[in-house]
Amino acid sequence: YQYLSRYKLKKNLDCFTFVPGKTEGTEKECLECLMEFCGRSNPSWTEISNFTHFLNFQLRKCENSVFCSPVVGGQFCGF
């Protein structure tokens, strides 16, 4: 939700890193955001769950990538 809400507001995600345990927004806002980006008009709980698991996996890989690190990432803005 932290990434998607910032993406929706067109904020720069290059400088953002997920903070575990940090609560942002309400449960309703989170669910609405997930449903918006899920890619389905009326997603089931399973589809939302699969979407969040896949997105979370991809974002963890991105955060751990050397190309997205503060040292090297500055040379690859928007990568």
Image (cartoon, rainbow, N blue to C red):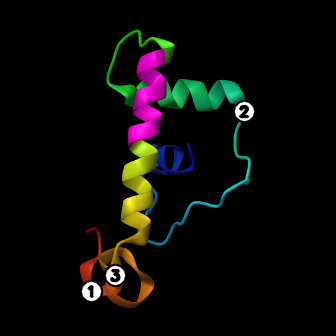
Q: Are marks 3 and 2 in contact (CB under 8 Å)?
A: no
Under mark 1, the amino acid is: Gln
Numbered mark located on residue 3 in the image: none
Residue position marked by numbered label 3 in the rendering = 73
Q: Amino acid at mark 3?
A: Gly
Q: Position of residue 29 (x, y in %)?
A: 63, 29
Question: Where, by quadrant of the figure, is residue 68 drawn?
Answer: bottom left
Q: Which residues are magenta?
A: 46-54
Q: Quadrant of residue 26?
A: top right
Left or right side of 69 for 39: left
* Mark linked to residue 26: 2
* Secondary structure beneath label 3: helix
Could you classify mark 1 by the number of other residues whose Cα lies within 10 Å: few (under 14), some (14-19), or many (20 or more)? few
Disc 3 crowd rating (10 Å Cα; few below 14, some 14-19, many 20+) is some
Q: Position of residue 24 (x, y in %)?
A: 70, 46
Residue at horizontal 30%, vertical 77%? Answer: 67
Tag 1 residue:
75
Left or right for 63, reference 78? right
